[in-house]
């Protein structure tokens, strides 16, 4: 009887998962279709999923109209730097928050929760003034600093859960052997946190890569603008989008995030299994 009842339930779960995947994939698939459509098909009153005459003209126009490679280089520099710095700062902080129970850890946890409730518009003016006093306006370094601060609370929240999953007995054994806190963190805890560190770095990278509002406000020089800001340049003076090149550029902008996730996903799973075997 239990098998009969579980099979319909399992089928329902798979069906719900399939519907959710279709819901997530629809915008991306339509973006790909639009990127390869010629101009007559883009203005058709009866759009189709598959272009009748696929073309690469939209990609050529996108590169001719805007400096996509330079903007992609700026985005890559900012995203990689922000992800690396956020992980380096968050790892020891998460270790302290997970292992030390007290008012400081409770206050830090409350800060993590509260900081995620602030909207961008609320902090942009004081943030702009602070960066102006530091002479970091219109600077990739200033944007990197903003992204690190903005992604740090969630990075801490993620890594605290991973640290608490590491058995404390392993650290106690290292302490018996004479290892200090720092040595224990580097030699014992950090290798087991590798999947969590990779996942946190990926989150920080994707957040910085896709962020638009801070980059729009803080970067004024065209040669320093990131890819999300450059995509807005495909809009005409009257707000009419150059749809073909815009879709092509947006499709190219999504490839790095998808590629990094596809590459790192296997390492995350492998690292979790390796950590389970070691413990």
Image (tube, rainbow, N blue to C red):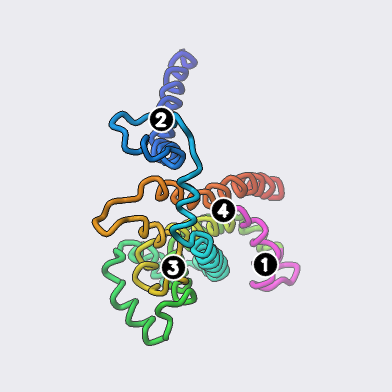
Measured in 3D between alpha carbons, the distance from the residue under mark 4 to the one under mark 3, in whole angstroms, is 40 Å
Name the residue at the left extreme: 238
**Residue identified by numbered label 3:** 225
- In the drawing, does residue 128 fall left or right of residue 177? left
Measured in 3D between alpha carbons, the distance from the residue under mark 3 to the one under mark 1, in whole angstroms, is 37 Å
Residue 45 point in image, percent of width and height: 28, 31
Does the CB distance between marks 4 and 3 fall below 8 Å?
A: no
Seen from the viewer's position, the closer of residues 156 and 177 is: 156
Q: Which mark is residue 186?
A: 1
What segment carries the magenta color? 174-195
- Lower sequence index among marks 3 and 1: 1
Other-residue count near label 2 (Cα within 10 Å), few / some / many at <14 / 14–19 / ≥20: few
Residue 107 point in image, percent of width and height: 39, 70
Q: Residue at x 44, y 50 (%)?
A: 250
Q: Which mark is residue 165?
A: 4
- Label 2 secondary element: loop
Q: Which mark is residue 49?
A: 2
Name the residue at the right extreme: 177
Does the CB distance between marks 2 and 3 fall below 8 Å?
A: no
Q: Which mark is residue 100?
A: none
Measured in 3D between alpha carbons, the distance from the residue under mark 2 to the one under mark 1, in whole angstroms, is 51 Å
Q: Nearer the viewer, mark 4 or mark 3?
A: 3
- Reply yes or no: does residue 154 show up in magenta: no
Q: Relative to 236, say whether 274 is above or below.
A: above
Q: Is residue 272 visible?
A: yes
- Label 4 secondary element: helix
């Amino acid at each position: 009887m239990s098998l009969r009842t579980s099979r319909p339930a399992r089928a329902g779960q798979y069906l719900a998962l399939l519907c959710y995947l279709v819901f997530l994939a629809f915008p991306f698939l339509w973006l790909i279709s639009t990127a390869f459509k010629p101009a007559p098909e883009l203005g058709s009153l009866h759009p189709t999923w598959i272009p009748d005459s696929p073309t690469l003209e939209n990609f050529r126009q996108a590169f001719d109209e805007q400096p996509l490679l330079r903007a992609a280089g700026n985005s890559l520099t900012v995203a990689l730097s922000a992800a690396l710095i956020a992980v380096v700062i968050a790892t020891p902080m998460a270790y302290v928050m997970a292992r030390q129970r007290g008012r400081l850890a409770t206050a830090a946890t409350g800060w993590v929760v509260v900081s995620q409730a602030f909207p961008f518009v609320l902090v942009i003016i004081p943030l702009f003034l602070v960066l102006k006093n530091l002479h970091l306006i219109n600077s990739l370094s200033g944007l990197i600093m903003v992204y690190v601060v903005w992604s740090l609370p969630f990075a801490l929240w993620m890594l605290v859960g991973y640290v608490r999953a590491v058995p404390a007995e392993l650290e106690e054994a290292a302490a018996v052997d004479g290892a200090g806190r720092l040595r224990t963190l580097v030699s014992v805890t950090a290798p087991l946190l590798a999947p969590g560190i990779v996942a946190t770095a990926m989150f920080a990278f994707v957040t910085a890569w896709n962020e638009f509002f801070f980059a729009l406000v803080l970067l004024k020089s065209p040669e320093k603008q990131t890819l999300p800001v450059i995509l807005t340049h495909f809009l005409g003076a009257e707000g009419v989008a150059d749809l073909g090149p815009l879709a092509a550029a947006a499709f190219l902008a999504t490839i790095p995030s998808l590629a990094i996730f596809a590459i790192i996903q296997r390492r995350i799973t492998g690292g979790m299994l390796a950590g389970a075997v070691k413990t």
